[in-house]
Amino acid sequence: MKLAFGSLYVCALLVAPALADDAREAVQQGGFLPFTQSPANVSLVRSFGDYDSARRSTVVQSDVQAKLSEKFQAQADLTYESGSVVPALAMQVSLFDEDKQVIDLQLGGGWTHSGFNQVDAGFLALASGATVRGTYLTSMARFELGQDAERAGVFGAAAIHEVRTHVFAGVDSKLGVDLERDASEPAHESSWDLQAGPLATFTSGKVQLTASAGFAAQRERTASASDVGVYGGAGVGGVF
């Protein structure tokens, strides 16, 4: 666990010299939210780790997002949980731009070694966002189709607002739902899980720091009752 967290800070230090832009604009577009994938088309690197008492686990997610053009971007993720490292790859295309079509809208697709159902899965995702009275509102929906026809949906919604220069406050949430059940299901598969809570972000030139804590709950497929708890986490990242 210490090695996983240590590697995140080493990664941030190595990338810092290459960071070229102010992180503030990326945060304003929801680029560093803990859970919700925003439609922001920007090059960035980030890591966020949290402990969830409902799941009784620590998750550390690190990813690099590269803007390839005004329309396309690529993303690579590594997620650490329960002693395992899970890779994921994705491509996204921007369909609408808020500056031209009122809202941001992005379509994405990719692969993960372990999706919501804990099996290899391909996925399609749609993310949207818009600024309303200085607050950026964003949401996402992702459909996963995995090994042995496992299916799941992952949904996110968030809002972030700059309360003073370089200081942001907001809320973020994520709900995962199992969309398929049969006689052959992965061990410890969740029927659903939820995380939702406030967040605070501070930017300084090229780098941002984020902290979040809130409500967490889940229900394993074979459990007779839901597990309820809290989560707390922090992250670091920057644009390049």
Image (spheres, rainbow, N blue to C red):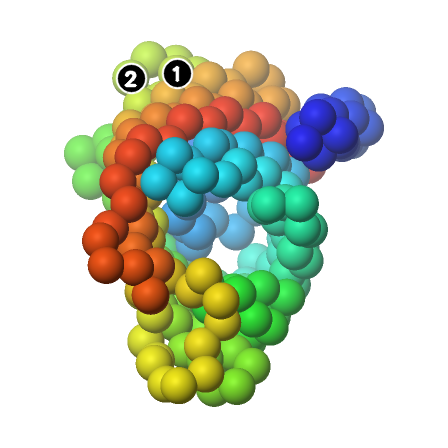
Q: Which mark is residue 203?
A: none
The residue shown at (28%, 45%) is: 227
Residue drawn at x 46%, y 27% as measured from the top left? 233
Instruction: Say whether residue 156 is left or right of residue 62.
Output: left
Instruction: Determine which quarter of the picture holds residue 230.
Output: top left
Q: Is residue 194 above or below residue 106?
A: above
Name the spot of residue 156 as percent of width and height, x first: 32, 52
Asked which secondary structure carries label 1, the reply is strand
What residue is shown at x 18% (from left), y 34% (from top)?
133
Q: Secondary structure at mark 2?
A: strand
Q: Would residue 86 be visible to someone looking at this image?
A: yes
Image x and y of residue 15, in percent: 77, 31
Q: Residues within 10 Å of mark 2 (few under 14, many from 20)?
A: few
In the visual, does 123 lie left or right of 69? left
* Front position in the image: 95 or 137: 137
Question: Residue 189: which quarter of the image?
Answer: bottom left
Residue reaching furthest left?
A: 133
Cα–Cα gap, marks 2 and 1: 6 Å
Residue 167 is labelled as 1
Q: Quadrant of residue 20?
A: top right
Name the amino acid, label 1: Val
Q: Where residue 132 sits: x, y (%)?
A: 20, 40
Q: Is residue 70 above or below residue 162?
A: below
Q: Is residue 125 visible?
A: no
Badge 1 crowding class, 10 Å Cα cut-off, few under 14, some 14 to 19, many 20 or more, is some
Q: Position of residue 47 (x, y in %)?
A: 60, 35
Quadrant containing the C terminus in the rendered view: top right
Identified by mark 2, the residue type is Val
Residue 163 marker:
2
184 left or right of 21 in image? left
Apparent side of residue 135 relative to residue 123 in the rendered image (left or right)? left
